[in-house]
Amino acid sequence: MASGKSTTIYVGDKDLNRNRTGGDDLPEIKILCFDLTHYNRTTQFLLCCAGVFALYLVYGYMQELIFTLDGFRPYGWFLTLIQFAYYIGFGYIERSLEKTTVPRCIPMRTYALLAFLTLGTMGLSNSSVGYLNYPTQVIFKCCKLIPVLIGSVLIQGKKHGPMDFFAAFAMCLGLILFTLADSQVQPDFDPFGVFLISMALLCDAAIGNVQEKAMREYRAPNNEVVIFSYGIGFVYLAVIMLVSGHLYKGIVFCAQHPVETYGYAFLFSLTGYLGIQIVLTLVRTCGAPMAATVTTARKAVTIALSFVFFSKPFTIQYLWSGLIVVFGIYLNVYSKRSKLTFADLGKMVTTIYHGAISRTPIARQGTKKLLLEV
């Protein structure tokens, strides 16, 4: 062994240890103050999954709880402004604790685009909660894998197999059926909410792929991405709300309900900030589609808990249309293992077709013989 330190930390197969250490050029993988660099990929993935589920379940609960406040529906964008302000503060606290003096890695032009997409994703998503049944909003977010796949093709030039497109089709079908069910059982169903969450998904698809490309190219730390993305996004939104007059109205309303707005928003933002750190790590290590798959699976649990903690009408169509979406998620995960291409699919169809033709005469002869024997 090269050193006693290496012997102490890594015990077992030499090849495995070599893959873990990977030399001096191994990219640093950190979540807040926790260094995951020297864990294997499977352990990194499982730790990130556990963090995503724990934090975003609380995040979803607090988001829905805030919108139960009477009169809060028009203030989704102001909630986004508060959320961005908290995120900036959390980012600076983390940066000061780590005592990092590393200069900015990603160009400001890229951050300007990331800030715009982040604002669209979170602002439109928060606003849609005021117009949609929360499970419907979440089921839409479950299907962000569809625009993520499209974005990965357009932005990064990636190629996807037929299983990915089958997964996208299943998600679209389940989403349509879930929305139809919601429109039947919800007396206050508003199509404007569908428009808002759909636009949020388009921004979300772009932001995941832009983040992945930028973080891999420049190897920027997570807190840098958070501070600059949300800092510039905060300026965008503050100027827009100031000009439109919604900033003053939001301040007045929240001053009347400080605990239900600023207090709940603190917990909402804290869990969201920690969750973003983990999602960024997932994007860095596993790619945008896999990160989207993990967060989508978490949303399925969020939907179930929403019906448990908040009273709302339920129909069995919610269940089986949601299962179609889950099936689409499974197909996407399976596609990462099978690596099935369109050429392979064509060969399989051809083989099955020729096999069916070759067996047909034999099957008919067997049927005639059986009838004669009877």
Image (cartoon, rainbow, N blue to C red):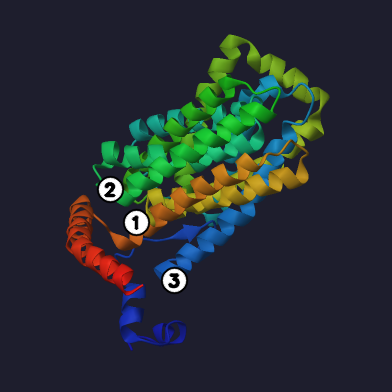
The reply to whether discs 2 and 1 touch (Cβ–Cβ < 8 Å) is yes
**Among the two numbered marks 3 and 1 on one chain, the one whose residue lies closer to the N terminus:** 3
Identify the residue position indicated by label 2 in the image: 160
Identify the residue position indicated by label 1 in the image: 335
Identify the residue position indicated by label 3 in the image: 39
- For residue 265, say whether it is visible: no
User: Looking at this view, is 240 or 149 the one in front?
Assistant: 149
Give the alpha-carbon distance from disc 2 to disc 3, as whole Å.
29 Å
Determine which quarter of the picture holds residue 129: top right
User: Looking at this view, is 268 or 356 the one in front?
Assistant: 356
Residue drawn at x 61%, y 40% as measured from the top left? 317
In the drawing, does residue 350 fall left or right of residue 265? left
* Amino acid under disc 2: His
* Amino acid under disc 1: Ser
Mark 2 vs mark 3, foreground winner is 2
In the drawing, does residue 62 fall left or right of residue 217? right
Q: Quadrant of the N terminus?
A: bottom left
The reply to whether discs 3 and 1 touch (Cβ–Cβ < 8 Å) is no
User: Looking at this view, is 274 or 151 the one in front?
Assistant: 151
In the drawing, does residue 144 fall left or right of residue 258? left
Secondary structure of the residue carrying numbered label 3? loop
Tell me if residue 352 comes above or below residue 323 in the rendering.
below
Q: Position of residue 105 (x, y in %)?
A: 35, 45
Q: Quadrant of the C terminus?
A: bottom left
Residue drawn at x 41%, y 34% as measured from the top left? 114
Tell me if residue 101 comes above or below residue 136 in the rendering.
below
Determine which quarter of the picture holds residue 314: top right
- For residue 28, say whether it is visible: yes
